[in-house]
C-alpha cells in the first residue's frame, strides 16, 4: 500500500495526547466500535463534534420514519436469531439493551433511535468526547495527528465513522434554485396545490413524495436511471415497498410521475421554475416543464475537508465515499480505516454495510483485525476435525443460527482452512474478499455464506421453483453456498436448497448433499 509523503516521524509536543486508536464520530458506527474496543481493553478515544450521540438521526430522515425494520415479535426466543429481523440494535453482551425496548413499531420513529444510541453510550460508559470536532487530520510516519479546538491527539490508527458529512449536489445548471432535502418544509400542507419536482429516486425522494402525496397537485420524481425496487434487487437501501402508493399514483394516471431524464437546467420564471429536461429512453426527446417547487433529494456525500493533502483518501468514481481494502482500510493511506455507512464500497448496493444491521457485524470483525495488527492478538479461530460429519454439523449449525451471515449475505462468510498437516481452522464472519486475499497461498479452503439467486426474474412474486437437491443452484431465495478455493481460484461450489422458514436441516435436501460434498472434496488431491 502506498501513501503520500508523510510529515514528521512523531510528535514530541508534551501537550499532545497519545492513543492507540482514535475514532471520529459518535453515530451508531462510532458507538458500536467504541464498545468493541472498550470490551477488548484497547486504548481508544472517540471524538464527536455534536453535544450528544446520533446527531444525524436528530435531523434525518426528515419525515422521521426509519426504513430499518423493527420486528419485535418472532417465532424464535434465541437472541442471535432474533437479530436477523432487528435492524436497529447494536451488538453487546449480554444483550440487555435491545432497540425493542424503545419502540414496538415496525418502522420506528427516528427519535427512538436518538434515545437508544444516547442510552447505549451512557450505559456502557464509552469514552466519547462531545463538542470535539476534528478540524484537521495530519499524517505522520507513526500515525496521525488529529487537531481539535482545545488539543491535538496523536494515534497509530485512525478510524473515521462520521457518516455523511454534507449533501450531494448534482452538477445541474440552476441547481441553486432547488431546495435541499436538509432544508425543505416537512409540513405537507406547504405543498398544497403545487406542482413539485423531486430530483432523485432513492428513499429520501420517495419518503418526501409519500409525505406530500395527498397535498401536491402534481409530483414528478426525476433522475437519469430507472428506479431500483428493493424487492427486485434484495438491497434494503433501494426503494421499499411501503412507498407503493407513489408508484400506484403513477400507474393510475393521477399525473404523479416517475421520470427517467436528465435535468438540463432549472430556471426561475416569475413565481415558478421552468425546468428543461431530456428524457433518457425517448430518442432524445426534450421537454420544458413548470413547477412551483423543486426539491433536491439526491443523497449525501463524505466531507473530506478535514484531511490534509498528506492523508486525503482516494474516493470511488462519484466521489461520495472512500475506497477501502479487504479490512476496511483506505486504499491509499496506511492506518486510516472507515466504519459504518462510509465503509460500503465493497458491497455497494448489495449487502447491508451501509446500515446498522450490516455494519454492526463488520465492526466486530474490524475490531479483531485491528487488534491483530496493532495489539498482536491473533485472529480468533477454532480447530476442527476435518471429517465430513463434523464439518456438516458445523456448517449447518452456523447457517441456521448466525445473524451475521444472514444479514451480510454475499459479503461476510465463514472460512474453513485446511493446512498442509491436515488440520482445519474455522474463522467466522470475515469478508469473502479478505478471505481470498488472506489465504491466497493456501491450496485448500472453503467459504460458507448465504446468497440469493441472481437470475433476472420477470416477476419476483411468480418464480418457478425446482425443489430438487441437484437443482439447488437455481434457488431464488436466500440459501447456503459452500465454495472451495485453491489459492484465489474457485474450484467448486455447492448450493443447498432454499427453505421458506430458512431452516436448512432436512436430511434429503441439506444434510446428505453437504456431507457428500465434504466427503468428495476433502479427499481430493491437494
Image: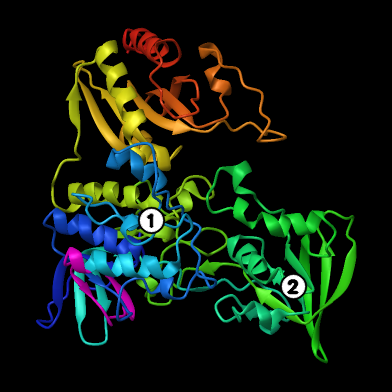
x, y percent for residue 443: 33, 21
Q: Report the quarter where the C terminus lies.
A: top left
Residue under the point 30% across and 75% down: 48
Is residue 110 visible to us here? yes
Q: Is residue 176 magenta?
A: no
User: In which quadrant of the rendered view does residue 45 lie?
Assistant: bottom left
370 relative position to 249: left or right: left
Q: Is residue 18 above or below residue 429?
A: below
Is residue 239 visible to us here? no
Q: Is residue 298 above or below residue 149?
A: above
272 relative position to 54: left or right: right
* Residues in magenta, as a range: 122-143
| For marks 1 and 2 on the same chain, the one whose residue lies earlier in the sequence | 1
Q: Nearer the viewer, residue 424 or 323?
A: 424
Q: Where does label 1 land, which residue?
A: 88
Q: Decide: few, some or many residues near mark 2? Use Cα within 10 Å; few <14, some 14-19, many ≥20.
A: many
x, y percent for residue 39: 15, 55
Q: Is residue 360 above or below residue 114?
A: above
Q: Is residue 123 magenta?
A: yes
Q: Nearer the viewer, residue 269 or 524?
A: 269
Residue under the point 43% across and 51% down: 353
x, y percent for residue 5: 33, 67
478 relative position to 43: left or right: right
415 relative position to 467: left or right: left
Q: Decide: few, some or many residues near mark 1? Use Cα within 10 Å; few <14, some 14-19, many ≥20.
A: many
Residue under the point 59% across and 65% down: 204
Label 1 residue SS: loop
Label 2 residue SS: strand
Q: Where does label 2 land, which residue?
A: 197
Q: Residue extending furthest bottom?
A: 270
Amino acid at each position: 500500500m502506498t501513501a503520500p509523503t508523510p510529515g514528521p516521524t512523531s510528535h514530541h509536543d508534551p501537550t499532545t495526547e497519545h492513543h492507540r486508536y482514535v475514532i471520529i464520530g459518535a453515530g451508531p458506527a462510532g458507538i458500536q466500535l467504541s464498545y468493541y474496543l472498550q470490551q477488548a481493553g484497547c486504548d481508544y478515544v472517540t471524538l464527536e463534534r455534536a453535544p450528544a450521540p446520533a446527531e444525524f438521526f436528530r435531523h434525518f430522515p426528515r419525515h422521521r420514519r426509519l426504513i430499518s425494520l423493527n420486528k419485535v415479535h418472532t417465532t424464535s426466543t434465541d437472541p442471535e436469531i432474533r437479530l436477523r429481523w432487528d435492524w436497529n440494535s447494536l451488538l453487546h453482551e449480554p444483550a440487555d439493551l435491545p432497540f425493542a425496548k424503545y419502540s414496538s413499531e415496525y418502522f420506528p420513529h427516528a427519535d427512538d433511535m436518538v434515545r437508544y444510541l444516547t442510552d447505549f453510550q451512557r450505559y456502557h460508559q464509552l469514552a466519547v468526547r462531545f463538542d470535539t470536532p476534528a478540524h484537521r487530520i495530519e499524517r505522520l510516519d507513526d500515525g496521525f495527528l488529529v487537531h481539535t479546538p482545545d488539543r491535538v491527539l496523536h494515534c497509530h490508527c485512525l478510524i473515521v465513522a462520521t457518516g455523511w458529512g454534507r449533501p450531494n449536489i448534482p452538477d445541474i445548471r440552476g441547481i441553486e434554485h432547488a431546495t435541499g432535502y436538509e432544508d425543505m418544509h416537512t409540513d405537507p400542507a406547504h405543498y398544497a396545490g403545487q406542482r413539485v419536482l423531486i430530483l432523485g429516486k432513492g428513499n429520501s425522494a420517495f419518503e418526501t413524495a409519500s409525505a406530500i402525496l395527498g397535498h401536491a397537485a402534481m409530483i414528478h420524481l426525476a433522475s437519469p436511471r430507472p428506479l431500483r425496487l428493493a424487492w427486485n434487487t434484495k438491497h434494503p437501501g433501494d426503494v421499499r415497498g411501503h412507498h407503493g402508493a407513489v408508484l400506484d399514483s403513477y400507474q393510475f394516471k393521477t399525473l404523479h410521475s416517475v421520470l427517467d431524464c436528465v435535468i438540463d437546467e432549472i430556471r426561475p420564471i416569475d413565481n415558478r421554475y421552468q425546468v428543461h429536461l431530456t428524457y433518457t429512453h425517448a430518442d432524445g426527446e426534450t421537454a420544458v416543464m413548470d413547477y412551483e417547487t423543486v426539491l433536491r433529494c439526491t443523497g449525501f456525500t463524505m466531507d473530506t475537508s478535514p484531511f490534509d493533502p498528506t492523508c486525503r483518501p482516494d474516493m470511488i468514481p462519484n466521489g461520495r465515499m472512500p475506497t477501502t481494502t479487504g479490512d476496511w482500510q483506505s486504499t491509499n493511506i496506511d492506518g486510516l480505516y472507515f466504519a459504518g455507512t462510509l465503509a460500503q464500497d465493497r458491497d455497494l448496493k448489495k449487502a447491508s454495510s451501509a446500515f446498522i444491521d450490516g455494519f454492526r457485524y463488520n465492526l466486530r470483525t474490524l475490531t479483531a483485525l485491528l487488534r491483530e495488527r496493532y495489539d498482536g492478538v491473533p485472529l480468533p479461530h477454532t480447530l476442527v476435525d476435518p471429517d465430513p460429519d463434523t464439518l456438516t454439523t458445523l456448517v449447518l449449525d452456523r447457517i441456521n443460527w448466525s445473524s451475521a451471515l444472514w444479514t451480510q449475505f454475499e459479503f461476510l462468510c465463514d472460512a474453513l482452512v485446511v493446512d498442509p498437516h491436515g488440520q482445519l481452522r474455522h474463522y467466522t464472519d470475515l469478508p469473502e474478499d479478505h478471505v481470498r486475499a488472506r489465504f491466497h497461498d493456501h491450496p485448500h479452503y472453503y467459504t460458507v455464506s448465504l446468497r440469493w439467486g441472481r437470475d433476472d426474474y420477470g416477476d419476483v412474486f411468480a418464480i418457478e421453483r425446482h425443489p430438487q437437491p441437484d437443482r439447488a443452484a437455481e434457488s431464488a431465495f436466500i440459501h447456503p453456498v459452500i465454495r472451495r478455493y485453491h489459492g484465489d481460484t474457485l474450484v467448486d461450489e455447492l448450493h443447498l436448497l432454499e427453505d421458506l422458514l430458512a431452516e436448512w436441516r432436512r436430511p434429503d435436501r441439506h444434510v446428505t448433499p453437504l456431507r457428500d460434498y465434504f466427503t468428495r472434496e476433502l479427499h481430493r488431491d491437494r
